[in-house]
Image: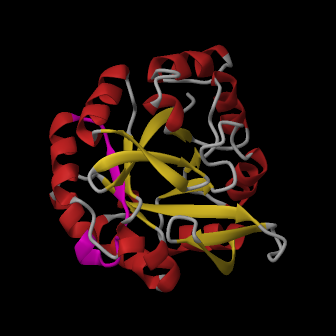
Amino acid sequence: MSVAVRVIPCLDVAGGRVVKGVNFLNLRDAGDPVELASKYYEQGADELTFLDVTATVDDHSTTYDVVQRTAEQVFIPLTVGGGVRTVEDVAKLLGHGADKVGVNSAAIKRPALIGEIADRFGAQVVVLSLDIKRSERTPSGFVVTTHGGKQETDIDAIAWAAEVVERGAGELLVNSIDADGTLAGFDLELIKAVREVSSAPVIASGGAGKLEHFAPAIDAGADAVLAASIFHDGTFTIGEVKQALAEAGQVVR
């Protein structure tokens, strides 16, 4: 039996409010995180991803009270990322209601962190968030970025994806910075490239704008699809996305 495709709304949070931009820039207010989380839960979201998009940039901890209030309202897996630097940060987030924790910049700075988290809490807790841009500087044509897409590294994104899975990452959240907020569709080439090197589940993120954008991302190798703008703006509901996936032959919950 095929594993059901997961549909995951993403709440990008800054200053306790949900925000949305294009290519990670020009952020605008999109509402209260707890209210939106509750709405998406009622619509049938399989999971929720909650990213404090200014935590690493501003060097402050993730908003634990918002995480806790969200966890008290929704009873589906909650992934929280942003500003996670240590195993203790992970323990604190799990203690406030997170089920999984997203790690990005800190893992790039010190890759051993991935294994430390996996060893203590299990690989299923570690969601390695990859903010990726197209670049001619790397063999694969994709480069890893940090600090919400603002800083490019010299790391080949596909090689890094393979490495983090070996180090213990239980899941890869693949964000296309180029596609983010454009509503022009997922970067299918990127999803395929990551799928080829990853034995861990892949979540496709960045670019969803139409119902017909979702099934191709699964066909390209994603196990789950993540979106923000189309849900926050009320363009489509979770149910409509699931229906479109089902009509395209995908198994949904």
- Front residue of this view, candidates 7 and 210: 210
Is 81 one of the magenta-colored residues? yes
Residue 163: x and y in percent read 61, 74
Is 155 one of the magenta-colored residues? no
Report the span colored magenta: 74-89
Residue 75: x and y in percent read 23, 35
Residue in the picture at 80% in, 75% down: 138
Residue 145 occupies quadrant: bottom right
Please say whether residue 57 is visible from this viewpoint. Answer: yes
Residue 67: x and y in percent read 22, 51
- Front residue of this view, candidates 119 and 46: 46
Quarter holding the N terminus?
top right
Residue 91: x and y in percent read 21, 68
Quarter holding the C terminus?
top left
- Front residue of this view, candidates 96 and 13: 13
- In-image side of 73 versus 240 (left or right): left
Figure check: 249 above or below 160: above
Residue in the picture at 31% in, 33% down: 36
Residue in the picture at 37% in, 23% down: 44
